[in-house]
Amino acid sequence: MFKNLKNDIPASIVVFFVALPLCLGIALASGAPLFSGLIAGIIGGIVVGSLSGSHIGVSGPAAGLAAIVLTAISTLGGFENFLLAVVLGGIMQMLFGVLRAGIIGYYFPSSVIKGMLTGIGIIIILKQIPHFFGYDANPEGDFAFIQVDGENTFSEIFRSLNFISWGSTIVAIVGLAILILWEKVLSNQGKVFKLIQGPLVAVVVGIIFFLLTQGTSLGIASENLVSVPVPEDASSFLAQFSFPNFSEITNPAIWVTAFTIALVASLETLLCVEATDKLDPQKRVTPTNRELLAQGAGNIFSGMVGGLPITQVIVRSSANIQSGGRSKMSAIIHGFLLLISVMAMPLLLNKIPLSVLAAILLVVGYKLAKPGLFKKMYQKGWKQFVPFTVTVVGIVFTDLLIGIGLGLAVGIIVTLIKSYQNSHFLHIEDKSNGKHKIKMTLAEEVTFFNKGAILKELDSLPRDTYLELDVRKTRYLDNDIVEILEDFAFKAKERNIDIKIISERGVVENPPSYIEFFTLRPKKSA
């Protein structure tokens, strides 16, 4: 864990600057205290980072749960009651891990996972454009198409053009230029430029710009800056923590909310794990059941001290990977940076322009959604391109889970279409003794999905045909297919079609009963 600190420390600083506004923004979008988002970020880094088997994944409050949290706080009768649901949800997540439910993550097609990464990259870019120009009506971390401020993703961009803050815009452009210069040129000029990351320099420049332009026409308003709660003393700092109301543990609504949190948080985590493993340069594989246990423990801790629900988050994880993070230490250090900063220097954090952080996120988004990826997916064929595109469009115009659900549904349909097409192979060999000799070879697994294709093929056979049906490679033959053969045998006599079946049991011509023949076959073959 400690041998990669020269890579992990710079990466953790970048993740810290990405995580800070997201923690605050997601808390604001959730209708929860701002400090609850910071608690979730701290625990996601330190606790989940320590327990997780993921080397480069970073956890914290999730945008996908914001709507659930917002509704739950009002319907459950207060934030303390909601915290109880978070604790119970964490226990359920740990139970999912014990029951080995982590395998679910492996059932999502690669095209959908790549579509998820690309869709999130596009969403990050679109959502950060208003912040880049100093228009912060919509909180950071609100990734849904329909926003909490009543606008949608695109109308917000057009609206922001009427409220451009020139100070915020100038420092954002300067910050973006620093990031590009650092990555394309300076990072190859010496070790010092790899140790000190471009995002840190951009943030420092942003703070200096804010201090120098106060009271001028280019001054940045307070609503365009980071807004970390500032405690007056130690007692007021501790007063920001909240605790669950265990007296409501018999309330059925809390248990329903807990299960919803556990289910959605687990699904988002598993999808993120699958995505980050694909982004990992070393192609390491995260143990998914251990990840559920770690996330469950994190949610128990978070709920106990007043934090939001936690998942592994692709935005922070991808920023970690892009910044050179090698081990889980980058996630853990980022958690400590959040803790130290909110305790020791909240006033300094509140001088960071949000537009500079938007510039950092624009770079993260672009790396996730490079235009060349669309061309690459198109070249792989429609079976990859269609689910990929549907996932991207679904995420941009709805939200993360709906977009992934649409992509998965299309992926299943594509699989069914290919299953329909690949149920058999048909060969017309020759014509002898007045009969066409046709050989049909069935696939290894033939299910009721293949009924239509096989039925169509059998019905199209001409009269006076000699059909050779090869089932030697077939390991599973659905009863529906056997019944089709049984019905076809009756029609075959009327059309002067002879049928020869070649199987592992031998060869038989025109069997009296197909159902009995295939039922008596050994289990290992059809």
Image (cartoon, rainbow, N blue to C red):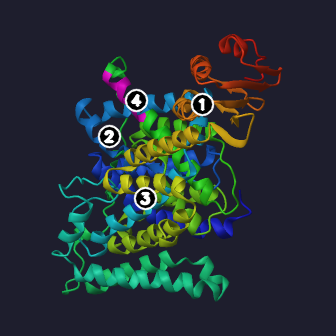
Q: Which residue is mark 3?
A: 120
Which residues, given as a range, are shown in magenta? 253-261
Whichever of callouts 4 and 2 sits on the residue coming sooner in the sequence is 2
Q: Which residue is mark 2?
A: 69
Distance from the alpha carbon under mark 2 to that under mark 3: 21 Å
Identify the amino acid type marked 4.
Answer: Ala
Q: Position of residue 298 (x, y in %)?
A: 51, 40
Counting other residues with Cα less than 10 Å from the Cα at mark 2, is it few (<14), some (14-19), or many (20 or more)? Answer: many
- Camera-side residue: 322 or 198? 322
Q: Which residue is mark 4?
A: 258
Q: Residue at x 40, y 45 (%)?
A: 406
Whichever of callouts 1 and 3 sits on the residue coming sooner in the sequence is 3
Q: Residue at x 47, y 51 (%)?
A: 387
- Camera-side residue: 390 or 323? 390
User: Residue 463: which disc?
Assistant: 1
User: Which SS class for mark 2?
Assistant: helix
Q: Position of residue 391 (x, y in %)?
A: 43, 52
Q: Residue at x 62, y 43 (%)?
A: 51
Figure check: 352 above or below 173? above
User: Dividing the image into 4 quarters, which one contains the N terminus?
Assistant: bottom right
Identify the amino acid type marked 1.
Answer: Arg
